[in-house]
Structures are given as structure tokens and as C-alpha cells.
Image (spheres, rainbow, N blue to C red):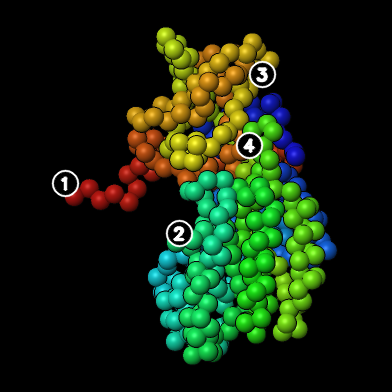
Amino acid sequence: MQQLSNDQLLSVAEKFGTPTYVYHAEQINSRYQQLTNAFAQSDVKIFYACKALTNINILKYFKSIGSNIDCSSINEAKLALHAGFEPQQVLYTSNGIAFSEIEEAKNLGIHINIDSISGLEKFGKAFGHSYPVGIRLRPNIMAGGNLKISTGHDKSKFGIPIEQMDEILQLIKQYDLHIKILHIHTGSEIDDVEVFVKGIEVLFEIIPLFQELEVIDLGGGFKVKYAEGDKVTDIELLASKVKSAFDNHPNPNGKPLQIWFEPGKFLVSECGYLITQVNVVKPTPDILFVQINSGFNHLIRPMFYDAYHRIENISNPSGEIKTYTITGNICETDTFATDRDLTEIKESDYLAIFNAGAYGFEMSSNFNSRYKPAEVLIENNDARLIRRRDEWQDLLRGQIDIA
Ligand SMILES: *Cc1c(COP(=O)(O)O)cnc(C)c1O
């Protein structure tokens, strides 16, 4: 893994101010290459799940390294096209959307995974066999780091439950639907390769029912390292299991099946850092608090998912170790880390929060009427601003003062 150095992070803080998200392009590339190398023996395509981080420069970077792109809304699909992706490189895996968005996606010429019986029926009525589509299935597999990020289990809203296969087949017959993709995405932070194998086995049972099938889309959800000693998805093991599974199950319709993946976190989590500055060091009888110029308005993962994020005092990397609770500055509990051993912290020190590339800036808000952070991209050791920090006008933008 290609980490930014302490000095690189410090110089971003000094040059661009804080709080600022910093992304490291070469780190993204190294994760992308790891995937494509691991799957080199299979017919695999990678679609970056861009909801993790959609800055237009990040999208363009993915385009430049040869990636395809997976979208969760029609606006993400339009951003992808705006960034220069060809329609056939763009996949829209939809969930609970209005049919008008599916029509719009079809008019853009992108791949679509439909995730409801109702959507499939409307699509069949409108377009019949003329436009090949995918179906997002719910395989009823429990997977992922915690319930909030599990999407394939038997109480999940995502996908068409596999039990409703008869209804799906009926619609295909009735409207002559052209089904070219079967999709499953069972959750995020899946560290157990067997979960993917189980998903594939569920699919092999139904593949013979789809005569025009060309693609098996296995979604994303690869786990990366947040804390020392974390288990991660063994990509190389996964690649060898996927290869042997598909070698042993040739597509009955004779066409070789292509395999798609949609990783988000795996590609961009580790490339990102949120650099913050310490406003207040607050000793209390029980806890030594450090309050930084941020909060869950900038990085919601610790409060929303109980996520662990490594933090380092980049202003004093070799100081004496003390135990701190790191919080933000908003009027709501916004703990980043509890009882964390860190090198001694003084007011005005810069703290870097790691693994901040995925679902960091993307889930940020203006809560407490605070500004969203700036974003900086480092490529070839060159640090460039790719989004300015919010300004006063941004808080009023879109509001209509009727007084
Ligand atoms: C969110 C999402 C992904 C990416 O998940 P990660 O855990 O970030 O890899 C992939 N596919 C779909 C359909 C998603 O909703």
C-alpha cells in the first residue's frame, strides 16, 4: 500500500487549511491493479461503485486507468458520462427508483440492473426485447460487516427475492425481456470469500433459466484494513475460487459468461485522509478530550456505523503516548475515537484520520451550518485542490428568502 508521508499530509494542511480531505491517486491505481492482476485469468470487468467518492477528478482518474463505473442514481450516471465514460462503461444498479429514471438510463444507453418485479414489468411493457437489461436478485445470504451494511439477506429491501423466480420467468416470457445480466450484491466489508462462493452457487442453479445471459455481476463489498490486525478480503483467493467455479460451470447457452465486480470501498477507502486541526484540549476528571475542527457533519462513519478510523497526530508524530477521546465541534455527540493512545496532542496540532476516502466527503453535510471540507488530490507528488471549501454563499444557495 502506498501511504502518504507525514510531511506530505502536513504540507497539505499548511497549504490548503483544514479540515481537508486528501486523496492519493497512486493508491487508487495500486488497488485497481491488484484487482485486475488477481482476476487476469478470468473474463472480469471492474466497475468502480462511485457512490463512495464522486469528485469529478476521481471519476476521470478511474477512467484514465481503464476502470468502468457503477452508479446508484441517475445523477451519478450523468456525472460518469460527464467525466468521459462511454455509455457501455456505465452500469446503473438501481434500487426503488421511479420508472422515469430507468427510462432515462435506457435513453443514455447505459447498462441497467432492475431490482423489482414492478420495474421489470414496466420495462417489459415499454421496451420488450429491444434493450438488454440486468436483474438484481436477493440471494438471501447474510453477509457484511454489520446489519446496516448487509443487503442480501432475507429481510433486505434490495433486489428481487430469489423465491420470486417464477414471477420473473413469467414476465420474461410475457414481454420477451432480454436478460443479459444477473446481479447480486450481498453487503459491504465482506471478509469471508466463501460468501461470494455461496452467491455464485445460488446463481449457478438459475443460470440455465436465462437463455440470453452474458454477465454475472457479483457486486462489491470487499473489506479493507481499518485497524491493525483487521481481516481483509483475500482477493487472490477469491479470484482463484471464482475462476474454478466458472470453469466448472460453463454457461449452458454456450456463450462464455463475463464476471463483473462493483467495488467501492476497496478502491478508495485507503487513498483518503481527513486532515483536521485541534481546537481544544479539554481535560475532565474521567476523560481527556481533544476537540477537532470537524464532526460527523464531515465524517459520519464512526457515529453511523461504529466504524474504527486510525488517527495520527501528524504535528507531533514521535511524542509521548497519552490516552485521548477525540470528538468534533458540533452540537451533538460526535466521537471519532474513544480512549485512543496517541502521541501527545496540543491545541493547533493537525490530526489525520485514515481510511477517509470511501463514504467520507460523500456523506458529509452542512449540519450546524458548518462548511463542508475542501478536497485535494495528490498525483505524481503534486497536490491540487479539487473542491474548494464551502463559503458563506454556499449556506444560502438554493434558499428562497420570502420575507
Ligand atoms: C454500495 C454498492 C457497492 C459498493 O460497495 P462497497 O462496500 O463500497 O464495495 C457495489 N454495488 C452496489 C449495488 C452498491 O450499492
The amino acid type, in three-letter code, at marker 1 is Ala
Q: Nearer the viewer, residue 317 or 243?
A: 243
Q: Which amino acid does label 2 sit on?
A: Lys
Q: Name the residue under label 3.
A: 317
**Dot 3 lies on which element?**
loop
N-term mark: 4 or 2:
2
Camera-nearest label, 1 or 2: 2
| Secondary structure beneath label 4 | loop
- CA gap between label 1 and label 2 equals 47 Å
Q: Which residue is drawn at 48% across and 48% down?
A: 148
Q: Position of residue 224 (x, y in %)?
A: 66, 43
Front residue of this view, candidates 183 and 129: 183
Quadrant showing the N terminus: top right
What residue did someone put label 4 on?
A: 226
**Label 1 sits on residue:** 403
Q: Of helix, strand and loop, which one carries label 2?
A: loop
Q: In the image, 282: left or right of 340? A: left
Q: Of marks 3 and 4, which one's residue comes earlier in the chain? A: 4
Residue 112 percent location from the top left of the image: 55, 72
Crowd class of label 2 (few under 14; some 14 to 19; many from 20; radius 10 Å): few
Q: How far apart are marks 4 and 1 (CA)?
A: 49 Å
Question: Is there CB contact under 8 Å for labels 4 and 1?
Answer: no
Which element type, helix, strand or loop, lies under badge 1? loop
Q: Residue 13 in the image: state x and y as whole percent.
A: 58, 28
- Identify the mark at residue 201; answer none if there is no mark: none
- Please report whichever mark, 1 or 3, sits nearer to the chain's N-terminal start: 3
Q: What amino acid does circle 3 point to?
A: Pro
